[in-house]
Image (cartoon, rainbow, N blue to C red):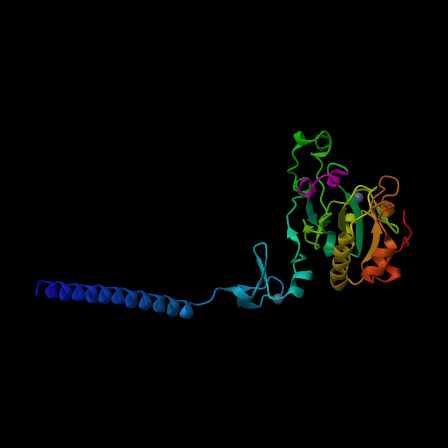
Amino acid sequence: MKWLFLLVGATLFYFWLKGKKQAKLNAEQATKKKVQQAKISEPQAIVQCQYCQVHLPKSEAIKREDRFYCSNEHTTLLDDQGWIGYAHWRLSPNQDQRPGGVSPDLAVIHHISLPPGGFKNQSCTHFLIDFFQNKLDPSLHPYFAEIADQKVSSHFLISRQGELIQFVSTQKKAWHAGLSSFLGRTGCNDFSIGIELEGDGESLFEEIQYQVLMRLSQALQTVYPKIQFAGHSDISPNRKTDPGVQFDWGKFQAKSGVALSKFPYGLNSR
Ligand SMILES: [Zn+2]
Ligand SMILES: [Zn+2]
């Protein structure tokens, strides 16, 4: 008899425990369902394409730094403020207005590296970004101490790894050419766009640098159809040698499809 009571007691306890567990499970499932429903009805974050201003859900947008784009195409074009979406935007204080609303009709190709040739051992692109932003630390290299006070900039820089960095809107004047003359017109900064290739004048430029330069040239031609191409050494022949003999003008012309007539100094290495 005693055993029977014990057995009934144990069975009742078992069912009570099981019931409690099930109640807990049911409660958990109900909460889960509520959260899911809340998620569905929660309004999606909406962002705007930097290029065309169309509104779209954040989950469908392409993100570049803190900007959003509706399509890959819209990251590759020059927007109405003179900026390219896929570039890293690093504003340089070394800029001013183009005189009298001049529209640029010349692209000047340069080379630069800091310290000169430093990229052969490690990535040195951040020194160039610092330089164009007046943040170069003169204590890091004897050469930096010589140049740290110079106030210069370029619209674009193409790193050895093919990153495109933009410092100045193409609608503004960057300080890249200095004393210069293009087919009789002096002060080339007024009407040109500066493109720096990370290089030292001795090393071959990287294939990816040509590819990025090609894409950039096409974007520039779309907005500025009259644009011509020259090297810094062409417009400042007694002062400058860049982009130098390692820059393959023929390859650039063939790859970019820019008309031959847009190269007034020809395609020979120089
Ligand atoms: Zn768009
Ligand atoms: Zn130059």
Is 252 or 190 nearer to us in this picture?
252
Q: Where is residue 72 in the image (x, y as percent from the top left)?
A: 65, 64
Is 123 or 88 nearer to us in this picture?
123
Q: In which quarter of the image is residue 81?
A: bottom right
Q: Position of residue 270 (x, y in %)?
A: 90, 47
Q: Can residue 79 be seen in this view?
A: no
Q: Where is residue 196 in the image (x, y as percent from the top left)?
A: 76, 47
Side (left or right) of 2 relative to 156 = left
Q: Position of residue 95 (x, y in %)?
A: 69, 46
| Vertical arrangement, residue 237 with respect to residue 55, above or below | above
Q: Is residue 58 magenta?
A: no
**Quadrant observed for ligand 2 in the rendered image:** top right
In magenta, the rendered stretch is 117-128
Q: Is residue 127 magenta?
A: yes
Is 13 or 80 nearer to us in this picture?
13
Q: How many labels does the image show?
A: 0
Q: In which quarter of the image is residue 244?
A: top right
Quarter the N terminus occupies: bottom left
Q: Can residue 71 be seen in this view?
A: yes
What residue is rendered at 41% in x and 67% in y? 39
What residue is rendered at 71% in x and 54% in y? 170
Side (left or right) of 245 relative to 50 = right
Q: Quadrant of residue 66?
A: bottom right
Is 224 or 249 nearer to us in this picture?
249
Side (left or right) of 170 relative to 64 = right
